[in-house]
Amino acid sequence: MNRSSADRLRRLRWLLTLMFTAMNAVGLVVFAWLVIDADQNSGEKQMDMELSRVTSTVSRLVGREGDAIVTALVGEDEINQQCPQFAVLPGGSGEFDPLYSERECVRMDPAVLAGLAEDAARTGRELYGYKRAMDGQMVWVRAEPFRGESGYLGAVVAVVNAEPTLESHNQLVLWVVVGATVLIGSLALAGHLLSARAIRPAVAALEQQEVLLAETAHDLRTPVAALRALAETALRNPTQRGDLLPRTVRLAARMGSIIDGLLVRARLAAGVERLAVQPVWLDQLVAGVVDETPADGASVTLTAAPCKVMVDPTLLQRAIGNLLDNALRYGRQPNQPAVVHITVANGRVTVADNGPGVDGDFADEAFDRFRTGSGSSGLGLSIVRWVAWAHGGTLSVYNAEDAGAIFDLTLPAVP
């Protein structure tokens, strides 16, 4: 299936939307990750600072006499009754009885705490991180080693419940994910609207170009065929060239006028030119169009009352010509010549034919491009409707009581 340039531009709109959304989504994901990581680090730092206060205080209360450890002062201090809980445990070269704080805030496996003290005393470094309590809860632990004369003798190990901090962090993660999702959706919508606004002039220009080409092909089809017929007749009958030459010149002039009208139509639609509106005698203009249009055996009658309208005469001539051409082509019974009657009065042009009429279900579609009153393809009626709208008038169609369709073109009359 062939796609028009306008269709490709619309696909480009979706591509631009996707690229805009993807770029912003990457930035939002990075920003969200930084926020989540910063919140996690902040929570862990806060818990570690709380445990550092405990371990440093207990370390100062631990007495040292050579390699002997005295914990009497620790048991007497009020920190022994508070949370976070702690333990003074031997490690490395130290040998003394472990001391656990009297208040148990979290149930911890003594072997886990002893292992932390041993690792801290052996490495001489402070250790901290997540561990799991005996009831399955997550805790944050910190082990701070202390020295004697011969080296590290043990460590103070403190423990705090990490569940409240982790719960707060998980809520933040949820809000960040939801907020980022909503924001990405909003950015996608905004990008779609902005891309549409950006390519709208290009789409409109391409659509006008396609319409211009289609209308040019439609309006020149008949004159070109007639011009070819005249040329072939003159070629076969040299003696008739003198009679055929004036008709050829008039036909060529008509083709030039059609092209000029199409270009003016395109420029008006693009907004680069204005209508050349002036007072025009509508009855005389319609009579001129009827006289210049070959009837080809059809019966065309005109009833006109003098009236003046404010219109662009070139465009109106084309609109009247399209109405008459539509009636001559499709407003007839099978194997019968067309019968067309035109009435002009009070700024209104009514074109009635004796054809099959217009299906009521498709009356509105009769003015679409590539449709005519009988359903055949074409641009004539759509051009007539555009000319009516451009002058502030209307074009309507309805069926006669006996037979045929009636097209009613109304234009602003001059008082």
Image: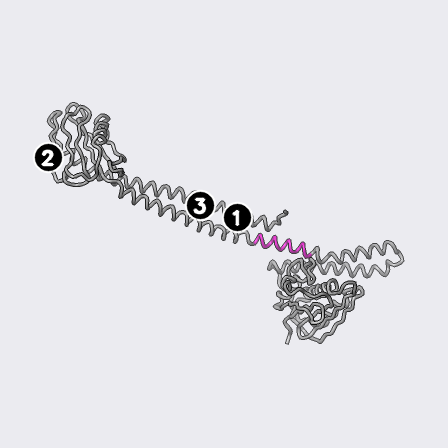
For the question of whether residue 386 can be seen, the reply is no
The question of residue 210 being in magenta is answered with yes
Q: Which residue is mark 1?
A: 14
Question: Magenta residues: mostly which secondary structure?
Answer: helix
Marks 2 and 3, how far apart at CA: 60 Å
Q: Quadrant of residue 223?
A: bottom right
Residue range corresponding to the magenta coloring: 201-215
Foreground of the two, 79 or 312: 79
Task: Sort mark 3 into few (<14), some (14-19) or many (20+) by Cα contacts within 10 Å.
Answer: some
Count of number-bearing discs: 3
Q: Which residue is mark 2?
A: 73
- Above or below: residue 256 compared with residue 106: below
Q: Which residue is mark 3?
A: 24
The amino acid type, in three-letter code, at marker 1 is Trp
Residue 271: x and y, percent? 60, 60
Q: Nearer the viewer, mark 3 or mark 1?
A: 1
Q: Secondary structure at mark 1?
A: helix
Task: Sort mark 1 into few (<14), some (14-19) or many (20+) by Cα contacts within 10 Å.
Answer: some
Question: Counting residues from the N terminus, which is met first, the one under dot 1 or under dot 2?
Answer: 1
Can you tell which mark lies on residue 341?
none
The amino acid type, in three-letter code, at marker 2 is Leu
Foreground of the two, 64 or 313: 64
The question of residue 383 being in magenta is answered with no
State if disc 1 and disc 3 touch (CB < 8 Å). no
Q: Secondary structure at mark 2?
A: helix
- Above or below: residue 73 compared with residue 213: above
Q: Secondary structure at mark 3?
A: helix
Residue 217: x and y, percent? 70, 55
According to the image, what is the colour scheme of the structure? one colour
For the question of whether residue 188 can be seen, the reply is yes
Question: Counting residues from the N terminus, which is met first, the one under dot 2 or under dot 3?
Answer: 3
